[in-house]
Amino acid sequence: MPTQHHFDVLIIGTGSAGMMSALQLADRLSIALIAKDKILESSSYYAQGGIAAVLDANDNFQSHISDTLSAGVGLGNKKAIRFMVEQGPSAIAALEQAGVIFTHKNGQYHLTTEGGHSNRRVAHVADKTGRSIQTNLFKKVKSKSNISLFEDFIAIDLLIKNQHCYGGYILNKSNNRVERFISHKTIIATGGGAKTYLYTSNPDTSTGDGIAMAYRAGCSIVNMEFTQFHPTCLYHPHAKSFLISETLRGEGGKLILPNGEAFMYKYDPREELAPRDIVARAIDSEMKTHGFDCVYLDITFKDKNWIKRHFPTIDKKCTSFGIDISVQPIPVVPAAHYTCGGIQTNINACSNIGNLYAIGEVAHTGVHGANRMASNSLLECMVFASACARHISQQNLSLEYPNFNDWDASRVSPSKEKVVVSHLWDEIRRIMWNFVGIVRSNKRLYSAQRRLSQIQIEVDEYYRLYLISADLIELRNLVETAQIIVQSAINRTESRGLHYNIDYLEQLKKPTNTIIQKS
C-alpha cells in the first residue's frame, strides 16, 4: 500500500456525521473515510433514544427552538439553533431515503418525549435508533465507488501550512506504518472526549482525538467545561456503563432510592423530565448523601410485553445480567456521556483554519450552549453534515498541494515500557472523575491542572523517544483534551448548566464562551 494518498476530501471519523457528509459529496468528489476502529464503532451506533424534529401538527419550530435555548442556559447560539431546528424534518427525510424506518403508530411517527422537551418530538427506531442509522448509512457508503474506506487507521496530526489544512498523517494500525493523506478539504468527525473520564457511556473510540489535533493545529476550542453526564447508565460490574435511554423516563419511569422512595421532586418541578444536568446532579447528591453505590429507575408499572416492544435492547441487556425490568427497578449511575464544547465552527461547519471543517460531537456549533437537550445530537450531526457537504460542493478545489515530508521515525525506538502508557491512561481518567466531575471546586480543578501538566511532560517525552502506536496516539490526545477541559472549567467563574462549581454558585448576568487556543 502506498505511503501517500490523494483525495478531494478526507473525512476522519465514521459516525453518522462523517458518513452522511461522505454520501452527500461522493457523486462528484473522491472521498477518503477514516475509521480508527471498525467502521460502525462510534457513539452514533450506541445512541438509543432518537432524533428530535418537529413532525407533529401540535408542535412547532419556535417551541423546539425555545426548549433548546432554555436547556442551553443562556449560551445557545440562536442563529445556529434556528437553522438546526428548521432543517429537522428534511434531516428525517434524508435518513428515510437512506433506508431508516422510524417507528410508527396508527400511520404516524411514534414520537416520544425526553428531558427538556415540551412536546413529543423524538422520532426513533424502537430503542436502537443509532444502530439503524449507522447500518443504513454504511450500506449506502459501501455502494459509492468514489468513497474509499480505511478501517483501523488512526489520525495522528493534521497537515498544516499557512493556516490551511491539506490532510493528515495517519497510522495504519495493521502494519504500524504512518501514511500521508493529502486532500483539498478535511472534515473532522471524530466524536467527543468522554473517555477522558473513568466512567462513561461512550465506546473506546471517544478519546478526544479530533479536538486535540485541531487544538495543535491552531483551531479555537470552545466551552469544553460542559461535559454532559448521562444520568442513567446501567450499574453492573460487567455492563461497561451500558446506557439506559432517557426515553424510559419520558414514558413515566421513576428514579427511586433503594427503599423505593422517589426523590426528583426535591430538585426540580419537572422531576424525571428535568434537563440532564439537573437529574445527574440530583442522583450524584443522593448517592453522596446516603453513601449509595447507585439509585434505581423503576418502569415496573408497565407490563412485560409493552417493555419488550418499546425497549427490546435495554430489556435484553438487563435480562443478560439477571435483571427483569418488568418486576425489578434498574440500578443506575451517572456517567460521562457527551462533549458539548469542541472545535469552533460557523453554520457551514468551517473552522478558523482554511480547508478544515468539523461536524458532529467534535464541533462547537453553539446549538447546545451549556447543556445539550436530549436527542438534539443526532439532529446536529445530520443537519451540519449536510451544510458542510453543500459548502464544500460550492468550492472550486485547487489542483495544487504543498509538499509534506514523509513521517520520520529514524530517531525513535520500540518501547520496552508500555506499562507507562496504560498507567498514565488510567491516572488521567481517575483525575478527571474525582476532580473534574459532576460537582467541582477550585481546589480540585487546580489539583487536576497541576498533575495533568506533569503527565503532559511525561507523555511528550515518551512520544519523542518511542515508535508511534495507536495507544500512544490516544494517550497524547487524552491528556491534551483533559487539560483543555480543566482550563475551560477554571476560566468559567460561575455555575451554569453542566458546569457546577461550589465556589461560584451564582450565574453571571452576561455569560460568555470560554475559548482555548494554542499560543
Image (spheres, helix red, strand yellow):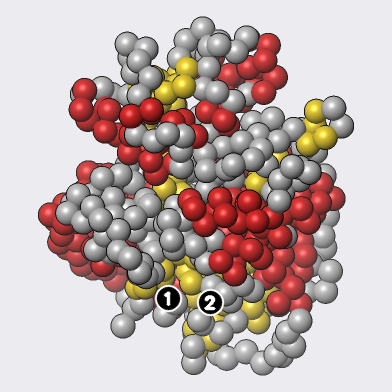
Which residue is most to the top?
327
Task: Estimate how packed mark 2 is, as few (under 14), some (14 to 19) or many (20 or more) residues with alpha carbons within 10 Å.
Answer: many
Mark seen at residue 27: none
Residue at x 84% of width, y 50% of height: 97
Please name the amino acid that badge 2 sits on: Ser
Task: Estimate how packed mark 1 is, as few (under 14), some (14 to 19) or many (20 or more) residues with alpha carbons within 10 Å.
Answer: many
Is residue 193 shown left or right of residue 440? Answer: right
Where residue 82 appears, as percent x and y from the top left, is 64, 63
Residue at x 78% of width, y 36% of height: 109
Is any part of residue 188 visible from this angle?
A: no
**Above or below, 81 relative to 185:** above
Where residue 470 appears, as percent x and y from the top left, is 43, 56
Residue 374, image quadrant: top right
Q: Check if mark 2's residue and mark 1's residue have beta carbons within 8 Å.
A: yes
Mark seen at residue 351: 2
Please name the amino acid that badge 1 sits on: Ser
Is residue 237 shown left or right of residue 93? Answer: left
Numbered label tally: 2
For the N terminus, the quadrant is: bottom right
Is any part of residue 499 visible from this angle?
A: yes
- Which type of secondary structure does the marked residue at label 1 adopt? loop
Residue at x 35% of width, y 15% of height: 261
**Above or below, 400 relative to 114:** below
**Above or below, 356 relative to 440:** below
Residue 495, image quadrant: bottom left
Q: Which residue is mark 1?
A: 220
- Reading the chain from its start, which is encountered first: label 2 or label 1? 1
For the residues labelled 2 and 1, the Cα–Cα distance comes to 8 Å
Where residue 23 appears, as percent x and y from the top left, is 77, 61
Where residue 424 appears, as percent x and y from the top left, is 25, 51
